[in-house]
């Protein structure tokens, strides 16, 4: 293996592809780098979009020693040993922490004096938005920057130095989901076989696309739309057919499962609350198992969702409420349910329900559907409120 992903890393920001909002010619963040005065920073975005490379280039631009760490095996002693070497020097290191969202509370507290006193420049990276994983104290001392997947033009530039047939280049690009590392790793595997690079050879290493979608965007959107609408329309045979088309087209099973989770809440909701449980279990299962067995799990979920009673009550209710709030509907909270109120009536002391004021103005966003379990929920509310069920 030639380790193309490592060898093709850019040597400066002029060669850096993508993330123009951060490293483009007139980007404010790049100006701070050029001035040698950037804040502690945390990068988040999908794999292979340049987070680690950016940190390496920042260290090079600022002429700082670069120390890569990983939160999955982060040790306080490692950090202390690095800092010892720079206690009495003007030069300060750049400490890069990957998977930063995995830092626990104690590890984050260890970073606070380092950040506060500028013993080192801290840059972290994550494939997840680390906002909620980082403490308020860490966030107060740093900036958070989002990275985006590389577009197809950027990936094509990376492949320019290789003499590849058009269909080979397109397969490498379209199945890599904007991940330059994944694209180059696939090419590296193919080159290392010392065989002629063909689609069959590439597909022997990567059977399914890394994309949230098939390689042809229009087909992808049409097929997933057809699947969702068939389930919404309770046509199990049509839904299974479109599921088969997506699977055969190399669709990422996790993407299909995520769409099923959304549908279970948006189109079935409380008419059958277990639909969301099954869809969520499906999403977790296919992520661990993958194809070919994931096809069975997806099919089971699709059939169940087709056969479930449908309700979009939750979808309509929250959208109507959001529109009301966006339109200026900011109501005063009744005093009896404000924090530390002495007038609040605890429903459990009254058999589970007691009449009291929860809104300062009568609003009605939830339009109950008399279907499935949602009908039971509606009847229960009417019962405890002393209303006659319709």
Image (tube, helix red, strand yellow):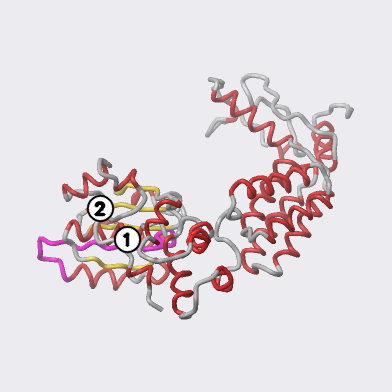
Rendered location of residue 248, percent (x, y):
69, 61
What mark, if any, has residue 14 been given in the picture?
A: 2
Rendered location of residue 149, percent (x, y):
44, 52
Residue 87 on the magenta segment: yes
Rendered location of residue 346, percent (x, y):
67, 36
Q: Disc 1 marks which residue?
A: 53
What mark, if any, has residue 327 been given in the picture?
A: none
Residue 313 to residue 149: above or below: above
Taking the image as shown, residue 132 lies to the left or right of residue 81, namely: right
* Structural crowding at the residue carrying mark 1, measured as other residues with C-alpha within 10 Å and reported as few (<14), some (14–19) or many (≥20): some
- Residue drawn at the location 69% of the way across and 69% of the way down: 292
Quadrant containing the C terminus in the rendered view = top right
In the image, the segment drawn in magenta is 85-104
- Residue drawn at the location 73% of the way across and 55% of the way down: 243
**Depth check: 122 or 345 in front?**
122
* Structural crowding at the residue carrying mark 2, measured as other residues with C-alpha within 10 Å and reported as few (<14), some (14–19) or many (≥20): few
Residue 218 to residue 291: above or below: above
**Depth check: 89 or 237 in front?**
237
Rendered location of residue 350, percent (x, y):
75, 36
**Depth check: 96 or 160 in front?**
160
Q: Which element is circle 1 on?
A: helix
């Amino acid at each position: 293996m030639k380790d193309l992903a490592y060898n093709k890393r850019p040597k400066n920001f002029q060669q850096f592809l993508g993330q123009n909002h951060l490293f483009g010619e007139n980007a404010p963040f790049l100006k701070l780098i050029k001035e040698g005065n950037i804040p502690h920073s945390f990068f988040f975005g999908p794999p292979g979009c340049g987070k680690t490379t950016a940190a390496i280039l920042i260290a090079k631009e600022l002429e700082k020693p670069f120390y890569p760490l990983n939160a999955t095996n982060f040790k306080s002693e490692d950090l202390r040993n690095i800092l010892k070497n720079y206690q009495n020097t003007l030069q300060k290191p750049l400490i890069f922490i990957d998977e930063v969202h995995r830092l626990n509370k104690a590890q984050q507290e260890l970073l606070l004096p380092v950040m506060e006193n500028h013993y080192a420049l801290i840059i972290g990276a994550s494939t997840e938005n680390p906002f909620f994983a980082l403490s308020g104290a860490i966030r107060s001392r740093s900036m958070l920057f989002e990275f985006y997947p590389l577009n197809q033009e950027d990936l094509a530039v990376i492949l320019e130095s290789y003499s590849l047939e058009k269909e080979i280049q397109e397969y490498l690009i379209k199945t890599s989901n904007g991940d330059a590392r994944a694209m180059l790793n696939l090419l590296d595997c193919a080159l290392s076989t010392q065989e002629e690079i063909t689609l069959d050879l590439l597909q022997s290493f990567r059977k399914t696309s890394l994309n949230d979608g098939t390689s042809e965007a229009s087909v992808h959107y049409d097929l997933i739309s057809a699947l969702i609408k068939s389930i919404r329309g309770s046509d199990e045979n049509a839904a299974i057919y479109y599921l088969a088309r997506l699977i055969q087209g190399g669709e990422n099973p996790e993407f299909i499962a995520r769409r099923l989770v959304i549908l279970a809440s948006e189109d079935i909701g409380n008419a059958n609350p277990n639909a969301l449980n099954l869809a969520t279990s499906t999403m977790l299962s296919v992520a661990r198992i993958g194809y070919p067995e994931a096809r069975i799990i997806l099919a089971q979920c699709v059939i169940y969702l087709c056969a479930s009673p449908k309700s979009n009550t939750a979808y309509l209710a929250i959208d109507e409420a959001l529109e009301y709030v966006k339109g200026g509907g900011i109501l005063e909270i009744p005093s009896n349910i404000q924090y530390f109120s002495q007038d609040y009536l605890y429903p459990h002391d009254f058999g589970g329900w007691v009449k009291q004021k929860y809104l300062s103005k009568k609003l009605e966003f939830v339009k109950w559907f008399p279907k499935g379990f949602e009908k039971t929920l509606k009847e229960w509310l009417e019962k405890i409120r002393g209303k006659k069920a319709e």
